[in-house]
Structure formats: C-alpha cells, structure tokens
Image: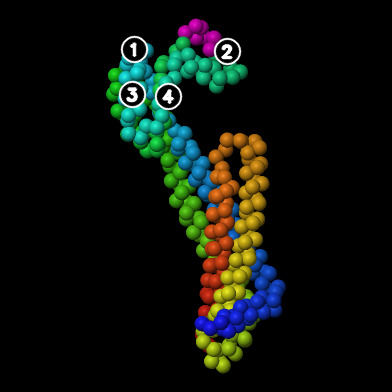
Amino acid sequence: MSFSTKWYYLRETFKSLKRNSLMSIASVSTVALSILVLGLFLTMVLNVNNLAQYLENQVQVTVYMEDSATAVQRRQTEQQLKIMPGVMEVKGVTKEQALANFKKRLREQQKLLDALGEENPFPYSFEIKVDKPERIQQIVPKIEQMPGVETAKFGQEVVEHIFQLTRILRIGGILLIVMLAIATLFIISNTIRLTVFARRREVSIMKYVGATNWFIRWPFLLEGMIMGFVGALVAAVSLFKIYDAVQEKIYATLAFFPLLPSWPFMGYLCAGLVAVGTIIGAAGSGISLRKFLDV
C-alpha cells in the first residue's frame, strides 16, 4: 500500500466524520454508553470475585485440645500442624485468651457470663490458616486423629456455601460478560450501519467505477475504529472517575472492605476497554458494509 493511498484513506475518513458529524457523535455516544455499561459490569464482577477469594482465604480451622492434654502434647501437636502440607500459619490460643475474645464479642451482653462464675469453659486451641480452602477437608480428619486433640472445627456448611457461591459468581459472571459483549457489538454495529446506510449511494458509485472492496472498505473501517476508540476512551475515563468516587465512599465507611485498588487494576481494565471499543468499531463497520458491497 503506497503512501498516497494511505493518505487518501485518512483524508476520506476524517472528511466523512466531519461531513456526518451528527451521525458520528451519535455513534461515539452509543459506543461510550455501551462500553461504560460493559466496564461497570466487569468492574462489579471482578470485585465480587475478589471478595469471594478474600472470604475463602479467611476460612480457618480451629483445633480444640482435650482438657487433659499436657503442655508437651500441645507443643508436639503444634509442631505436627506446622509441617502439614498447605498449612501457612499456626497460632496457639490459651484458655484465658479464648475467654477474653469471647467477652469482646459479647460487648453489652456480659451478664451472660455470670452463670459461669469463675469457671473457664474454653479449651486450649490452635487457629490454622491454609494456602487454599480446598485443603481444609483433607487435613481435618488427620488432625482429629492426633493425640490430645478433641476436635477440629472449620464451619463445613459455611465453607461449602462459599465454594458454591464463588462457582456461581465466576461461571455466571463469565456468561453475562460474554452476552453483554455480544449485545454491545450488536448495538454498535447497528449504529454504524446507519452511517453506512446514509452513504450507500457513494459506495454503489465507487463499485460501479471499478473500485475494489478493500479500497472502499478501508475508510469505513478506519472511521469505525476512530469512533470506537473515542467512545471507549470517554467510557474508560468516566469509569475510572466513577470507580475512584465509589471507592472513596466505601472506604469512608468500610475501611477494610477488599476492593481491588484503582492502580493497576483500573489501568489494565481501561486499556482493555479502549482496545475492545476500537476492535468492535472496526468489526461493526465491516459487518455493516458487507451488504452494500454486494452490488
């Protein structure tokens, strides 16, 4: 492709955008709105997925020792727990610490402890964190067979519900993102089709005078790419500002809520959306133009 041909394509592209300014603005607006909706949904799905991973990582095993267990047995149990596959951290909790933690959780309902008197019903225990929640069901039966261990609790029902929830969120999120991306392509291609339809006579004349399909197609593809790029860029900037504002609001009330940080998460997401918008703009032009090239 010669330089003069490339220059012709660029000149025709910008001439068309200027000549059909209202249609171009409508197309860019549609692209921006569609990409923004896609970006908002992607942001929500990815943050929900991050929250699910956070909840999974908070799942831990509590190992309760028998009251008759000696200090030597407790030390041996701690050493055995630390060398188990997947165990990241083992923390010992004394009877006194367990009672103090329970009092903190009760807050204003301290009167419930009056019935206990001076007795401390809490056993010595270990809190175990693992590298991945799937290991919990594997190691609990082994822990319960150790000498001096009374039982090991990990909230089986809660863990199973978390696993089920994360599976639904991940599978459902992927399906919805794909459906939304297809809908976005459909909306954008139909919007760009209006631009092509308004210039159908120009396309027909070019075909009759012997212009090749690609010679006709390139200015439209570039036009679609420019509209897709500009629209996606507007959507990306808007999404970045919306996410920053929402993040600030959430952190003002829930300081430890596990939101994905603005950078580099939003940087990668916005760059991806701009690329997707540009590709969809080109694809929309190509799909829309196909009908009018069959002369």
- Disc 4 marks which amino acid? Lys
Boundaries of the magenta span: 113-119
Residues under labels 1 and 4: Cα distance?
Answer: 17 Å
Mark drawn on residue 70: 1
The residue that mark 2 highlights is: 111
Say if 7 sits above or below 80 in the image. Answer: below
Q: Is residue 61 magenta?
A: no
| Residue 185 point in image, percent of width and height | 54, 66
Splitting the image into 4 quarters, where does residue 8 fall? bottom right
Q: Name the foreground residue: 127 vs 112.
A: 127
Give the mark nearer the N terminus: 1 vs 4: 1
> How far apart are the alpha carbons under marks 4 and 2?
29 Å
Judging by the rendered image, the residue that carries numbered circle 4 is 91
First in sequence, mark 1 or 2: give its number: 1
Q: Is residue 17 visible?
A: yes
Query: Looking at the image, which residue is at 55% across and 50% down?
Result: 264
The residues bearing labels 3 and 4 have C-alpha atoms spaced at a distance of 11 Å
Q: Nearer the viewer, residue 37 or 132?
A: 132
Q: Residue at x 63, y 59 (%)?
A: 235
Dot 2, crowdedness within 10 Å: few (<14), some or many (≥20)? few
Amino acid at pointer 2: Lys
Label 1 amino acid? Thr
Percent of width and height locating residue 252:
66, 37
Residue that numbered label 3 is attached to? 79
